[in-house]
């Protein structure tokens, strides 16, 4: 029985995730604080809603699991670029805010190139979600409460470092389990 591949691509959560790519483009060209606050709000809302819908209605797809973090990173990158161009953030602040995202990208490429990591599913973790919330709060602060920006950047940096360590330790533990199971399978079949 063949399955309609497009049915899995165009689920409501995937459409919401994809909308963040459009919101990223809109943020790059948006003028005015109100419009930019609204775009960050919309991106925040779609990020929360797509995950909730995917879990609640069982609309989880492999495509969505890839699309959601990519859309998140593109939106964050667009905001950071716009804030850098506008002089609203210093380069060091943007680098700290995007640190976890860079580490995630490095981790993803590493996972694709190391055979034993391919078997380990990557899932969102609490510290990673906290970084995303911190990034969004910082984006709002840049526009609405600039005196809070440096403190929030430092907080996001600390959370980003903790998140990177958390993901690394999780992979290491799962690596041990995958290698143990592989060696058990090899001896069982011998």
Image (spheres, rainbow, N blue to C red):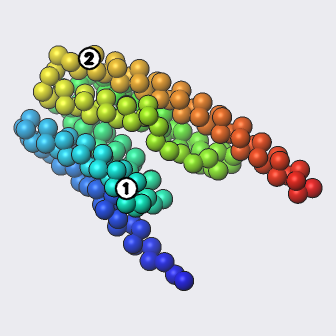
Q: Report whether 63 appears left or right of 175.
A: left
Residue situated in front as seen by the camera: 31 or 68: 68
What residue do we see at 35% from left, 24% from top? 156
- The quarter of the image holding the C terminus is bottom right
Residue 99 visible in the shown view = yes
Image position, residue 162 (x, y; %): 48, 24
Residue at the far front: name it: 56
Q: Earlier in the sequence, mark 1 or mark 2?
A: 1
Image position, residue 169 (x, y; %): 60, 30
Question: Judging from the image, what secondary structure is the residue with disc 2 in?
Answer: helix
Residue situated in front as seen by the camera: 124 or 31: 124
Question: Judging from the image, what secondary structure is the residue with disc 1 in?
Answer: helix
Q: In the figure, residue 36 lies in which quadrant? A: top left
How many numbered marks have been drawn onto this rendered protein structure?
2
Residue situated in front as seen by the camera: 91 or 93: 93
Image position, residue 70 (x, y; %): 39, 48
Residue 67 visible in the shown view = no
The residue carrying pointer 2 sits among few (fewer than 14), some (14 to 19) or many (20 or more) residues within 10 Å by Cα, namely some
What residue do we see at 34% from left, 44% from top? 72
- The quarter of the image holding the N terminus is bottom right
The residue carrying pointer 1 sits among few (fewer than 14), some (14 to 19) or many (20 or more) residues within 10 Å by Cα, namely few
Residue indicated by mark 1: 56
What residue do we see at 25% from left, 42% from top? 44
Q: In the figure, residue 53 lies in which quadrant? A: bottom left
Residue indicated by mark 2: 150
Q: Report whether 81 appears left or right of 32.
A: right
What residue do we see at 42% from left, 60% from top? 58
Report, in whole angstroms, how far the alpha carbon at label 1 lies from the one at label 2.
Answer: 37 Å
């Amino acid at each position: 029985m063949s399955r309609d591949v497009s049915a899995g691509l165009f689920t409501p959560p995937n459409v919401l995730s994809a909308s963040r790519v459009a919101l990223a483009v809109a943020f790059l060209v948006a003028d005015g604080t109100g419009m930019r606050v609204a775009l960050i709000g919309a991106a925040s809302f779609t990020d929360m809603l797509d995950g909730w819908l995917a879990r609640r209605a069982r609309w989880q797809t492999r495509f969505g699991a890839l699309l959601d973090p990519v859309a998140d990173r593109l939106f964050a990158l667009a905001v950071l670029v716009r804030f850098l161009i506008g002089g609203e953030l210093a380069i060091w602040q943007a680098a700290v805010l995007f640190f976890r995202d860079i580490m995630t990208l490095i981790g993803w490429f590493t996972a694709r190139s190391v055979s034993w990591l391919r078997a380990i599913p990557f899932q969102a973790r609490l510290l990673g979600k906290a970084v995303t919330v911190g990034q969004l709060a910082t984006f709002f602060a840049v526009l609405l409460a600039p005196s809070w920006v440096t403190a929030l950047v430092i907080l996001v940096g600390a959370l980003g470092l903790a998140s990177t360590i958390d993901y690394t330790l999780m992979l290491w533990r799962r690596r041990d389990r995958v290698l143990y199971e592989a060696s058990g399978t090899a001896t069982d079949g011998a």
